[in-house]
Amino acid sequence: MKNHPVLESQQSKTHAYASRTLAGCWTLPPQRALSLRAQQRARLRVQHGGVWITVTGRADTMAQDVFLSAGDACVFEAGSHVVMEPWRASRAGLVPFIGGAEVRFRWDPLPAPVPIQAEAWAGSVAAPWADLLEALRGAAGAAGRLTKGLVFWGVRRRFRAHPLRTACIDAQCE
């Protein structure tokens, strides 16, 4: 598997704590910590148990703690330093595992995000969006003028004098 050398390259040969038990999963035994350096953008997905992760990136950013349970995932950018250890929730809060529980997790590489180029965005999305907004404004104005005209002609027709009524009133017929 492609991520196999990435994890093993981050461990010492004498203290290789993480091992594989299920296809595609790594196992982290209790009371052990594992240090990983993401060589490319990657996703960590916890399959079983829970982990406490401390992430550091560039020198100008602070470390960040993340807690993940089974089914949770987190994406790390290339160059991130990830230290993880098993944990569990208790009534007193988060405490490290003390017993025989272990964590199973996947570390899968992800493709790098594709940067959006400003000119391409402006030409293919921003300009048509502006054209559409202008057309909608024009259509709204036209709909308003049409409504005003229909109301005007409807009112005018209703209240205009009918020729037959006028003739009967002048002749005083009923």
Image: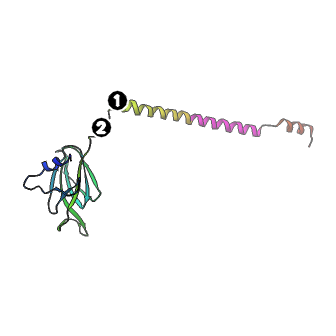
| Secondary structure mostly seen in the magenta stretch | helix
Q: Nearer the viewer, residue 174 or 112?
A: 112
Residue 50 percent location from the top left of the image: 24, 60
How many dots with numbers? Answer: 2
The stretch drawn in magenta includes residue 142? yes
Which residue is painted at 63% across and 35% down in the image? Answer: 146
Q: Amino acid at mark 1?
A: Glu
Q: Secondary structure at mark 1?
A: helix
Q: Quadrant of residue 47?
A: bottom left
Q: Which residue is mark 2?
A: 114
Q: Amino acid at mark 2?
A: Val
Which numbered tag is attached to residue 119?
A: 1
User: Could you tell me which secondary element the residue under label 2 belongs to?
Assistant: loop
Vertical arrangement, residue 102 with respect to residue 39, above or below: below
Q: Nearer the viewer, residue 112 or 102?
A: 102
Q: Position of residue 68 (x, y in %)?
A: 26, 58
- Residue at 19% of width from left, 65% of height from top? 97
Instruction: Quadrant for residue 151, please give it.
Output: top right
